[in-house]
Amino acid sequence: MSYFAKKVVVVTGGSEGIGKALVELLLESGARVATCGRNYEKLYQLQTANAGRPLHIGTADVSKESDCKNFINSVVETFGTIDILINNAGLSMRALFKDLELDTLRTLMDVNFWGTVYCTKFALSEIIKNKGTVVGVSSPAGFRGLPGRTGYSASKFAVNGFLEALRTELLDDGVNVMWVAPGFTASNIRNVALDKDARPQKENPMNEDKLMSAEECAKYILKSIEKRKRTLVLTLLGKTSLLLNKFLPGVADKMVRKFYFKNGKLVK
């Protein structure tokens, strides 16, 4: 029997990318899955592709407290409980701080940080009852500030700090709290990354073909949940940047600058 068989797993932002891959792998593993997103059409397509499987969908904007509360309540009404919450919904950005409107940072914090806080708050009583798991899909940007991503890094640092504090609070309750840093993964997140005016950029500076697939990333995340790990950092680049930032921060500054800039211009 799969570790996830019969468990109720909530995945926010499950209509595409890593979230969608998580949903499909969990259904294959026999889990009862609930997911949400802002685009009903994409959610409906996901549900149709998995007809006959225990998949509950809900339209929700995780930056809105009421949407999160209504969605989590609908999951409990549908499946009776929640065993695992994977806070996957998130936005990225690409703009220099000196150029951007502050709404860009506010939007990033509302989705990435507050979305995680809201969903965790409303699901936590069920997760404590089941001695389950809370997961935050973070980023190496949550350990190391990245240029052109001030709001993204700030939101992911906040997520990591929130989850680490929560993990410590729940040590005696049998709940595992973990955060994962996928690094660059093939997904739509860069196409919808916010520009300096908090609007989707609709362009991608990365070669998606050379990045880890969403499916591979999802497999690593699920294995880590099963092992009840504390943290998971994927990709060699992510691991290297974290080690350099810890032991040689000055060197890390220069290497990160070189990676993201060319002739003084932000290119990634």
Image (cartoon, rainbow, N blue to C red):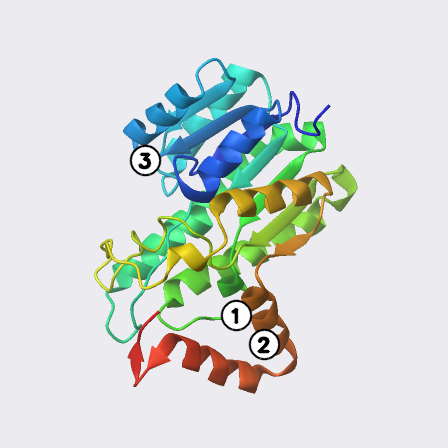
> Residue 27 in the image: x percent, y percent?
55, 25
Query: Residue at label 1?
Result: 144
The quadrant the N terminus occupies is top right
Mark drawn on residue 129: none
Density class for disc 2 (Cα within 10 Å; few <14, some 14-19, many ≥20) is some
Per the image, label 2 sits on a secondary structure element best described as helix
> Residue 245 in the image: x percent, y percent?
58, 76
Q: Is residue 143 left or right of residue 39?
A: right
Give the residue type at disc 3.
Answer: Arg
Which residue: 64% across, 32% down? 127
Give the residue type at disc 1.
Answer: Arg
For marks 2 and 3, the one nearer the N-term is 3
User: Among all residues in the image, which is located at the extreme top?
Assistant: 52
Q: Is residue 264 above or below residue 10?
A: below
Which residue: 73% across, 43% down? 227
Query: Residue at label 2?
Result: 245
Q: Is mark 1 in CB contact (under 8 Å) with mark 2?
A: yes
Query: Residue at label 3?
Result: 38
Which residue: 44% across, 16% down? 51
Q: Is residue 111 above or below residue 201?
A: above
Q: Is residue 258 above or below residue 235?
A: below
Instruction: State the separation of the CA atoms marked 1 and 2.
Output: 7 Å
For marks 3 and 1, the one nearer the N-term is 3
For marks 1 and 2, the one nearer the N-term is 1
The quadrant the C terminus occupies is bottom left
Q: In this view of the protein, which residue sits in the foreground, 45 or 138? A: 45
Q: Is residue 10 above or below residue 76?
A: below
